[in-house]
Amino acid sequence: MPSYHLNHINIRARNLEETRDFYADVLGLEEGFRPPFPSKGYWMYTAGMPIIHISSYEEDSDARTNPDGMGAGLDHFAMWGAGLADQLATFEKHGVEYTKRLAGGGSVIQVFFHDPNGVQIELGFVPQAEGITKDNFDGELHS
């Protein structure tokens, strides 16, 4: 049986530069090499890997995911991270609205927010590594 890992996601953006800046400023990703495709776009890197591709949204093209979420299609994408307090401070600095919850019986901190295109993103953090317990968590508790 084949073996896979997630290579990247592609986000079709109405404003390429705003989307690029969001992923750079809010998540610390870096713009990097992108092959010379005929259309404009950006590839955003972390740890030497281009994990988010940003391409131009064309007004006359069909939607490829369900913008209402929780239906048929992409609901969100998720990344694991470290440094919850710093990330939340960055959200505050840039006015990014988010929700956070302690889920899985206290085994994961989930932070949800949206990029400028309405794409929902989840960041996951290990509670023990962040010094978080059920007693000191200041968000929603989910089992």
Image: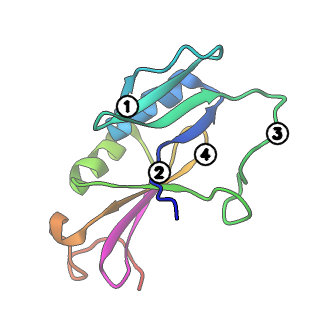
Q: Nearer the viewer, residue 114 or 123?
A: 123
Q: Is residue 55 magenta?
A: no
- Residue shown at the point (34%, 85%) measured from the top left: 105
Which-is-in-front pick, marks 3 and 4?
3
Other-residue count near label 4 (Cα within 10 Å), few / some / many at <14 / 14–19 / ≥20: few
Calculate the distance from the C-alpha at mark 4 to the C-alpha at mark 1: 17 Å
Which-is-in-front pick, marks 1 and 2?
2
Calculate the distance from the C-alpha at mark 1 to the C-alpha at mark 2: 20 Å
- Residue shown at the point (30%, 80%) measured from the top left: 106
Q: Which residue is mark 1?
A: 24
Question: Hey, what amino acid is under mark 3?
Answer: Asp
Other-residue count near label 2 (Cα within 10 Å), few / some / many at <14 / 14–19 / ≥20: few
- Residue shown at the point (44%, 53%) measured from the top left: 5
Question: Hey, what amino acid is under mark 1?
Answer: Ala
Residue 101 x %, y %: 39, 71
Answer left or right for 59 relative to 110. Answer: right
Find numbered disc 3 in the image and state the secondary structure of the residue it sits on.
loop
Range shown magenta: 98-113
Q: Is residue 99 magenta?
A: yes
Residue 49 x %, y %: 36, 36
Residue 81 x %, y %: 29, 54
Q: Is the residue 61 above or below the residue 114 in the image?
A: above
- Point out the tag, 1 or 2, that comes first from the N-terminus: 2
Q: Which mark is residue 62?
A: 3
- Point out the tag, 3 or 2, that comes first from the N-terminus: 2
- Residue shown at the point (61%, 39%) measured from the top left: 117
Calculate the distance from the C-alpha at mark 3 to the C-alpha at mark 1: 28 Å
Which picture quadrant has residue 95? top left
- Point out the tag, 4 or 2, that comes first from the N-terminus: 2
Q: Is the residue 119 above or below the residue 139 in the image?
A: above
Question: Hey, what amino acid is under mark 4?
Answer: Gly
